[in-house]
Amino acid sequence: MEIKKLSKSEEKLSFLIKGINYSIANAIRRSVLEIPTLAIDTVEFYKNDSALYDEILAHRLGLIPLKAPKTFTSREKCSCKGKGCMKCTALLKLKAQGPKTVYSSELKGKGVEVVYKDMPVVILAKDQELELVAEATLGTGRQHAKHTPGLLWFNAVPIVKEIKQAEKAVKVSPQEFEKIKKNDLKTCQDYLNEIVESDNKFLKIEASDTDFIFFIESFGQLSPEEIFLEAINSMNENLEDLAKALKKEK
């Protein structure tokens, strides 16, 4: 197996993996839903004079990306046995009075970091007040989409072959034809599983069964590299659980 980085930014990453198959690639993609991240789970309102109902505000707060302390654990694994304590439950407070726009940065909690400080929560008119206490816990995207740390998807690497003729072909410009011939990834993806033609020359673009280009876009809780590594760890844990279950059946 070979891994090659193609492009990288703070929130996005793309890389090439050679020597796997569709099943493994898809298992990595699905394992992103197994990565635990912190999100607001319950909200207790003391004052809410805004135009939004409590339920709508609670939903908006739940979608704000949060970074948990490294020592944080899930309620299922915590020594408090799910009752809720400082090890598994983070308390965040918000108190504001209008006229103003309330932003995510006004959520205050010990050890908890709000990823995007300028996310608008609600607009308060003059003399309107908002006061609340929220509980944030670790969860996975399988439990709720608000816990998803980002997006991961993949495309098969295109394989370009020259052929003599074809009954049906997509006509392309000479410039595009040359890009495809040189295996330009972006151009080839547009014509995957097609035959292209220019000046009576033909190219067939097929999808590889063993080589894939992965794309990761982070929502901010974890870096793209951390999302990939955590997805691999989650997949390995599931495989270990499967192996143990199979041993018990023997």
Image (cartoon, rainbow, N blue to C red):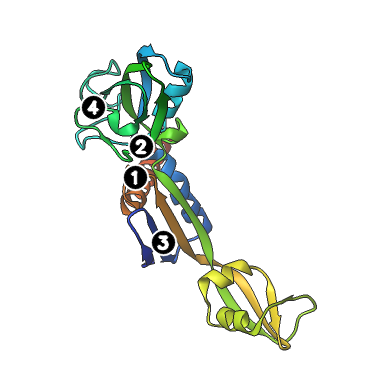
Q: Looking at the image, tell me whether mark 3 or mark 1 is earlier in sequence order.
A: 3
- Alpha carbon separation for disc pair 3 and 1: 16 Å
Categorize mark 1 by other alpha carbons within 10 Å: few (<14), some (14-19), many (20+): some
Query: CB of mark 3 within 8 Å of CB of mark 1?
Result: no
Return the disc, 4 or 1, that comes first in the chain's sequence: 4
- Type of residue at label 2? Pro
Q: Nearer the viewer, residue 171 or 70?
A: 171
Callout 4 crowding tier (Cα within 10 Å): few <14, some 14–19, many ≥20: some
Q: Which residue is mark 3?
A: 14
Tell us which disc is closer to us: 3 or 1.
Answer: 1
Task: Look at label 4 and name its amino acid.
Answer: Gly
Looking at the image, which residue is at 34% across and 39% down?
118
Q: Where is residue 143 shown, x and y percent of the image?
A: 45, 30
Q: Is residue 163 above or below residue 221?
A: below
Residue 65 got which mark? Answer: 2
Location of residue 164 with respect to 130 vertically, above or below: below
> For numbered disc 3, what is the local secondary structure?
strand
Of the two numbered discs 1 and 2 on the same chain, state the one appearing first in sequence. 2
Residue topped by disc 1:
220
Image quarter of residue 149: top left
Residue that extends furthest to the top in the rendered view of this protein: 46
C-beta proximity under 8 Å, tags 3 and 2: no
Q: Quadrant of the N terminus?
A: bottom left
To which residue does mark 4 refer? Answer: 109
Q: The residue under label 3 is which amino acid type?
A: Ser
N-terminal of the pair, mark 3 or mark 2, is 3
Separation (CA) of disc 3 from disc 2: 22 Å
Q: CA distance from mark 4 to mark 3?
A: 34 Å
Q: Mark 1 near mark 2, Cβ–Cβ under 8 Å? A: yes
Q: Is residue 67 positioned above or below 21 on the image?
A: above
Looking at the image, residue 215 sits to the left or right of residue 117; the answer is right
